Image (cartoon, rainbow, N blue to C red):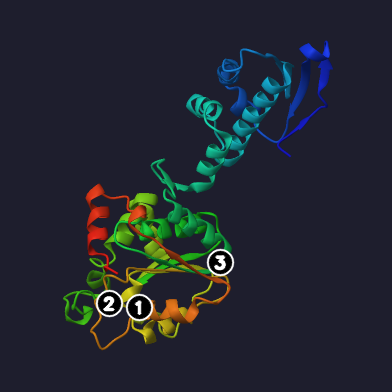
């Protein structure tokens, strides 16, 4: 329980009904709610001029009309929830909590994926990005399909990093098919990492945005983060891991089946792709397209389709995507 609330005591005539309510704060650091020299609680009270508030220790006593008391109670509860979720409460947080609608605040909190090493908040911004977040919590395997700029890779990486931070998995594995726009890794100079790095840059960018560069490199050295071409998945059992297959549209049907059957105990899989950008030879069918057809009725596998409404790049990107959509 966040706090215990005593029964409301009614004061005065029925047509001029005044009430009294006692709130007992439980299970939080009171300093985070009240602040130094009571500055946070004074800020909170300044928004409720129609009630009289007396606080002592973990008890808050409120006098006023029922509706005003109920509003006070809702907002103080929202502040406590914020402390329990983020372990802090600023003066700006208090102002936002009091002014904004409770449902909006709850939705915003639920849409937060993680806080980066620099304090940036990573959120699921659009409706379908929020669906990626919710479906990943319900299902161990999800497919995220949509055009460039819809945040499918970034959102997926954020969810994976959160799982690692929360110790739900022991490692993160990122992979993708080696073929890109007619190029094959075997014909490129350098070792495997050097060959793969240019193709995995969106993954690196996302990881270093959410973790520090130093930590990403440390995790790679320790094998906690693994980045490898799809061919290297063959024969492995991927357990206790969060695994992301990026650019899934460029897998063949055989490669996709091989990858999906690597799933081990306590593993989470996200497969991303854009079926409008298939770089395979025409003789090969896309493994992602085939997976949509063959796996769509399996109960614990989820497919999320993103579109131009989910684009969070320059406004022109939405228009470009719409212009290239097939005309029916």
- Please provide percent x and percent y for residue 191: 23, 75
Nearest to N terminus: mark 1 or mark 3 = 3
Q: Is the residue under label 1 in contact with that under label 2 (CB below 8 Å)?
A: yes
Q: Position of residue 61 (x, y in %)?
A: 74, 18
Residue 195 occupies which quadrant of the picture?
bottom left
| Quarter of the rendering occupied by the C terminus | bottom left
Residue of label 1: 230
Spatial separation of the CA atoms under disc 1 and disc 3: 23 Å
Q: Could you tell me which residue is drawn at 51 percent across and 77 percent down?
A: 263
- Give the label, 2 or 3, closer to the camera: 3
Q: Which residue is mark 2?
A: 178
Q: Nearer the viewer, residue 84 or 108?
A: 108
Q: Residue at x 61, y 12 (%)?
A: 49
Quick one: SS at disc 1? helix
The crowd level at tag 2 (other Cα within 10 Å; few <14, some 14-19, many 20+) is many
Q: Which mark is residue 139?
A: 3
Number of residues whose C-alpha sits closer than 10 Å to that of mark 1, classed few (under 14), some (14–19) or many (20 or more): many
- Residue in front for this viewpoint, 270 or 166: 270
Cβ–Cβ under 8 Å for marks 2 and 3: no
Horizontal side of residue 231 vs 59, given as left or right: left
| Residue 101, above or below 300 | above
Secondary element type, mark 3: loop
Which residue lies at the image location 22% right of the left edge and 78% below the top edge?
185
Report the Cα–Cα distance between label 2 and label 3: 27 Å
Report crowding for label 3: few under 14, some 14 to 19, many 20 or more residues within 10 A (C-alpha): some
Which comes sooner in the sequence, label 2 or label 1?
2
* Mark 2 or mark 3, earlier in chain: 3
């Amino acid at each position: 329980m966040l706090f215990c609330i005593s029964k409301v005591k009614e004061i005065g005539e029925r047509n001029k009904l005044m009430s009294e309510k006692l709130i007992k704060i439980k299970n939080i650091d009171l300093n985070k709610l009240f602040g130094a020299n009571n500055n946070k609680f004074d800020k909170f009270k300044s928004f409720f001029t129609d009630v009289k508030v007396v606080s002592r220790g973990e008890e808050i006593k409120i006098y006023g009309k029922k509706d005003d008391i109920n509003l006070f109670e809702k907002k103080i509860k929202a502040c406590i929830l914020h402390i329990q979720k983020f372990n802090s409460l600023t003066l700006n947080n208090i102002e936002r909590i009091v002014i904004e609608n409770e449902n909006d605040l709850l939705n915003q909190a639920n849409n937060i994926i993680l806080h980066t090493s620099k304090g940036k908040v990573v959120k699921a911004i659009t409706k379908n990005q929020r669906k990626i977040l919710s479906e990943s919590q319900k299902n161990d395997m999800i497919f995220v399909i949509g055009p460039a700029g819809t945040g499918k890779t970034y959102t997926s990486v954020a969810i994976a990093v959160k799982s690692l931070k929360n110790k739900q998995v022991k490692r993160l594995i990122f992979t993708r098919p080696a073929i890109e726009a007619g190029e094959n890794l075997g014909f490129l100079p350098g070792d495997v990492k050097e060959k793969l790095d240019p193709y995995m840059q969106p993954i690196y960018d996302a990881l270093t945005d959410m973790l520090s560069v130093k930590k990403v490199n440390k995790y790679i050295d320790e094998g906690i983060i693994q980045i490898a071409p799809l061919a290297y998945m063959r024969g492995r059992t991927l357990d206790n891991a969060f695994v992301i297959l990026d650019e899934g549209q460029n897998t063949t049907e055989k490669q996709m089946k091989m990858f999906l059957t690597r799933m081990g105990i306590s593993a989470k899989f996200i497969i991303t792709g854009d079926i409008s950008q298939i770089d395979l030879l025409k003789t090969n069918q896309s493994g992602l397209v085939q997976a949509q057809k063959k796996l769509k009725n399996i109960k614990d596998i989820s497919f999320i389709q993103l579109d131009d409404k989910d684009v969070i790049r320059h406004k022109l990107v939405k228009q470009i995507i719409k212009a290239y959509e097939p005309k029916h």
